[in-house]
């Protein structure tokens, strides 16, 4: 191919486009999606780029078909992705469960907008974050990242593919409309510097003794085989045993579902990502993520200017929830402030790990949260602390 | 020379193509899905394509269980979503022969949107639809192919809706090949599956099938054998019959039209193949 | 001796195929499709039942040599239970 796949260099790039380029840099060569604001530009970019580099782009008839198609293509061995927003995310939920159950890797991007329902198609929200954790029926392990810049959209999209392949799960990139539509510097590394985590493959060859869902390794991840490799595997969404055959017993069900949850839980320490600013001596911890985090960090710096010992924790991974970081911070702070563009979702998660009060700075969505309400909350908390 | 009366065997000639360790399968006595599956299995053997290159994708329902019994790469996916899943497999690895095997409800109700769009795109897939006129797995509810006036658990007073005329629907959507047979027409079913394997574009083979427990009993067709007799009496080759008259009506003695209903060469879907390491 | 309007030139070499019937009894579900559709009426329901209680087919006494290996029972059996193999003369 004469067209360059990895666009190495310094760019002034649109967030959605950075997502598309991150996927390409990760080796994604199959995208199936459906247009939905504010993620459409990801599809449009890939519609042009993928055929140039020998990949497949297909616009499906709906999001359910999109999710099914990317699972099928991944089952055949490709790195695959889809991108959507809230309404499409809801439609994809059943097949997300299928990918979890079949342990087929893929990346699902949700550029969040004002929700629920049709909501605010062109304006930001962050209210799908709990849905990323619990959206499909049943128990399963979830990995979800929240970028706050186009650069991070690129980086985390690339990383998402590696995590997906490593743990055989769909990985969620929970962006928001502000990050998806802003244009900022994005540095794309040379192709040889990009790290690839390969899917685990079987040690032994093809044979009737091969059990596609036997996961005896410490990481609880079974080796993956693809369609057409001669293994003649059976994948079913029904509860199954190590051979992949349906097994309707409570024992098999508990064994399988526990493993799906546990394989992510065991890897939590390596999967979680956070960033701290001014936290070492902080007494008030401000927690935020995505575009809201930009305002939150600004508010923390402003609070410090006024002599308030505030610190900032940015959640880069939403799931697994970085509870170790939260608990460590809880050892030296008196209160938490959680700023998010929803009516209290990650605040619940913070709250259940700490005994300190958690103050939410909430807005249902529609505009990037400015620093002022976050600063007000910090000042409030500080005043109350002083009153004691 | 006198042959033995009946010889007990332990292995069937198709046992390498099916998961013999899972026999007997779950379908009811007299159910036709096993017949359709057998035709598919034999077509696979005769296809000249290595078993390792065949993939079957199914949905939810009794017909969907076929995937679990085929000894090839098989995917038992979500309700109605077998076709887009199969599309993903095929586009990622175009060298594979991908077949969708599912039922009338899975393909034309919840899966209806994917059915018509895959036909419109004319993707190179073979779709085998066992049409037993109801949702059998869940106990015999009506579906989009339940004939007018038929009884089911959700139409206890008789189905007030007209069913889909699937060949007409798929012709309009753009499929290259549509045929309809019954589980009685075992030779034609196998022949058409083989034909569909080799024909580029979207192929759809509707196979009417008895469902004695779900559909038959409420509609006074007590056994699978009786429904097969009904097929024998009422099926008529569709030569010259316009597609819009292909709807199935089981009342009275109306004919059931079978045969190769559409066979054309519209341009099949083309997409740049994915470079996937073998 | 059948009288043909036109006698095929290779009539003397043509042989009607003969088949031997095989059954995997534990797979049979007694649907009787093989019995009903055998063009030579070679099969009937037996009084034997398998472990699940289904009555399996048997060759009608005296019709051991009547199977012509048309393979219809093989094709119409939903259970992968009954099949015929051609007997070479």
Image (cartoon, coloured by chain):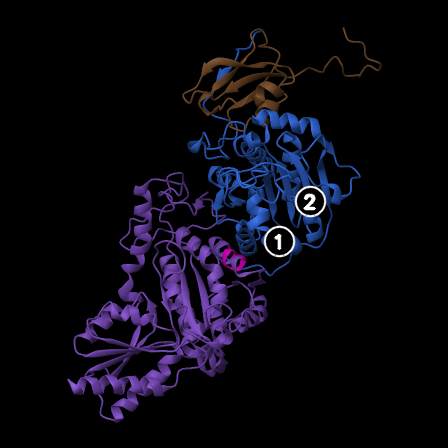
Q: Is residue B2 above or below residue A203?
A: above
Q: Check the residue under mark 2 and report the chain it is in.
A: B
Q: Identify by letter the chain in blue.
A: B
Camera-nearest residue between B137 and B154: B154
What residue is drawn where x is 80% and y is 39%?
Answer: B240
Residue found at the very far left of the displayed protein: A388
What residue is drawn where x is 43% and y is 77%?
Answer: A365
Q: Which mark is residue B167?
A: 2
Majority secondary structure of magenta residues: helix
User: Mark 1 or mark 2, which has the lower sequence index?
Assistant: 1
| Boundaries of the magenta span | A65-69
Give the SS element for disc 2.
helix
Camera-nearest residue between A200 and B189: B189
Q: Say if the magenta span includes residue B80.
A: no
Label 1 sits on residue? B118
Q: Identify by letter the chain in purple.
A: A
Q: What distance separates the C-alpha of mark 1 from that of mark 2?
A: 14 Å
| Mark 1 neighbour class, 10 Å CA radius: few under 14, some 14 to 19, many 20 or more | many
Q: Residue A315, percent across and down?
A: 32, 74
Q: Residue B107, percent across and down?
A: 58, 47
Q: Residue A301, percent across and down?
A: 29, 89
> Which quadrant of the structure image shows residue A362?
bottom left
Give the SS element for disc 1.
helix
| Mark 2 neighbour class, 10 Å CA radius: few under 14, some 14 to 19, many 20 or more | many
């Amino acid at each position: 191919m004469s067209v360059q796949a990895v666009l190495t260099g310094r760019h002034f790039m649109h967030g959605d486009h950075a997502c598309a380029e991150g996927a390409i840099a990760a080796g994604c060569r199959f995208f199936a999606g459906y247009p939905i604001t504010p993620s459409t530009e990801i599809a449009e970019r890939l519609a042009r780029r993928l055929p140039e580099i020998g990949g497949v782009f297909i616009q499906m008839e709906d999001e359910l078909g999109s999710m099914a198609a990317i699972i099928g293509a991944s089952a055949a061995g490709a790195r695959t992705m889809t991108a959507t927003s809230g309404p499409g995310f809801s439609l994809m939920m059943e097949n997300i469960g299928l990918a979890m159950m079949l342990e087929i890797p893929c990346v699902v991007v949700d550029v969040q907008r004002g929700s629920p329902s049709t909501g605010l198609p062109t304006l930001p929200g962050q209210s799908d974050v709990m849905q990323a954790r619990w959206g499909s029926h049943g128990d399963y392990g979830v990995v979800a990242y929240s970028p706050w810049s186009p650069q991070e959209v690129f980086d985390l999209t690339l990383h998402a593919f590696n995590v997906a392949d490593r743990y055989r799960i769909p990985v969620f990139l929970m962006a928001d409309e502000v990050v998806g539509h802003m244009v900022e510097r994005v540095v794309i590394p040379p192709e040889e510097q990009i790290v690839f985590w390969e899917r685990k493959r079987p040690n032994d060859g093809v044979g009737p003794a091969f059990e596609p869902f036997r996961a005896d390794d410490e990481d609880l991840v079974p080796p993956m085989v693809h369609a057409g490799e001669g293994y003649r595997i059976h994948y079913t969404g029904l509860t199954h045993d190590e051979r992949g055959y349906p097994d309707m017993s409570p024992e098999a069900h508990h064994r399988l579902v526990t493993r799906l949850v546990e394989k992510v839980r065991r890897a939590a320490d390596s999967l979680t990502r956070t960033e701290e600013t001014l936290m070492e001596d902080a007494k008030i911890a401000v927690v935020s993520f995505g575009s809201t985090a930009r305002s939150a960090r600004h508010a923390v710096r402003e609070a410090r200017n006024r002599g308030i010992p505030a610190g900032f924790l940015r959640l880069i991974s939403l799931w697994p929830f970085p509870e170790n970081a939260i608990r460590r911070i809880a050892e030296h702070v008196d209160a938490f402030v959680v700023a998010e563009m929803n009516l209290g979702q990650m605040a619940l998660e913070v709250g259940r790990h700490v005994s300190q009060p958690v103050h939410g700075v909430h807005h249902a969505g529609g505009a990037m949260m400015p620093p002022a309400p976050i600063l007000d909350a910090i000042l409030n908390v500080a005043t109350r602390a002083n009153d004691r | 020379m006198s042959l033995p009366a009946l010889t007990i065997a332990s292995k069937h000639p198709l046992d390498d193509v099916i998961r013999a360790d899972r026999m007997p399968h779950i379908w009811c006595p007299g159910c036709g899905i096993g017949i359709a599956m057998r035709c598919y299995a034999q077509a696979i053997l005769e296809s000249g394509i290595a078993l390792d290159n065949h993939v079957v994708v199914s949905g939810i329902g009794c017909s969907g269980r076929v995937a679990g019994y085929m000894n090839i790469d098989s995917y038992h996916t979500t309700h109605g979503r077998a076709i887009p899943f199969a599309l993903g497999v095929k586009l990622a690895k175009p060298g594979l022969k991908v077949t969708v095997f599912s039922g009338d409800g899975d393909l034309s109700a919840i899966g209806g949107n994917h059915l018509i769009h895959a036909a419109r795109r004319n993707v190179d897939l073979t779709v085998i639809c066992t049409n037993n006129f109801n949702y059998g797995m869940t106990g015999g509810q009506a579906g989009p192919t339940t004939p007018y006036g038929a009884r089911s658990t959700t139409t206890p007073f008789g189905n007030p809706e007209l069913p889909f005329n699937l060949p007409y629907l798929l012709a309009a959507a753009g499929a290259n090949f549509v045929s309809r047979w019954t589980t009685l027409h075992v030779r034609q079913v196998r022949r058409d599956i083989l034909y569909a394997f080799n024909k580029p574009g979207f192929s759809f083979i509707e196979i009417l099938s008895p469902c004695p427990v779900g559909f038959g009993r409420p509609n006074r067709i007590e056994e699978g054998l009786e429904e097969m007799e009904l097929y024998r009496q009422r099926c008529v080759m569709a030569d010259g019959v316009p597609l819009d008259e292909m709807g199935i009506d089981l009342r009275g003695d109306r004919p059931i039209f079978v045969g190769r209903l559409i066979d054309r060469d519209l341009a099949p879907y083309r997409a740049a193949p994915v470079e996937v390491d073998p | 001796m059948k009288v043909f309007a036109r006698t095929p030139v290779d009539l003397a070499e043509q042989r009607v195929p003969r088949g031997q019937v095989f059954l995997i009894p534990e797979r049979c579900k007694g649907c009787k499709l093989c019995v009903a559709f055998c063009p030579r009426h070679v099969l009937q329901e037996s009084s034997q039942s398998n472990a699940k209680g289904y009555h399996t087919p048997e060759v009608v006494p005296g019709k051991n040599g009547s199977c012509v290996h048309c393979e219809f029972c093989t094709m119409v059996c939903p259970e992968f239970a009954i099949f015929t193999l051609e007997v070479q003369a």
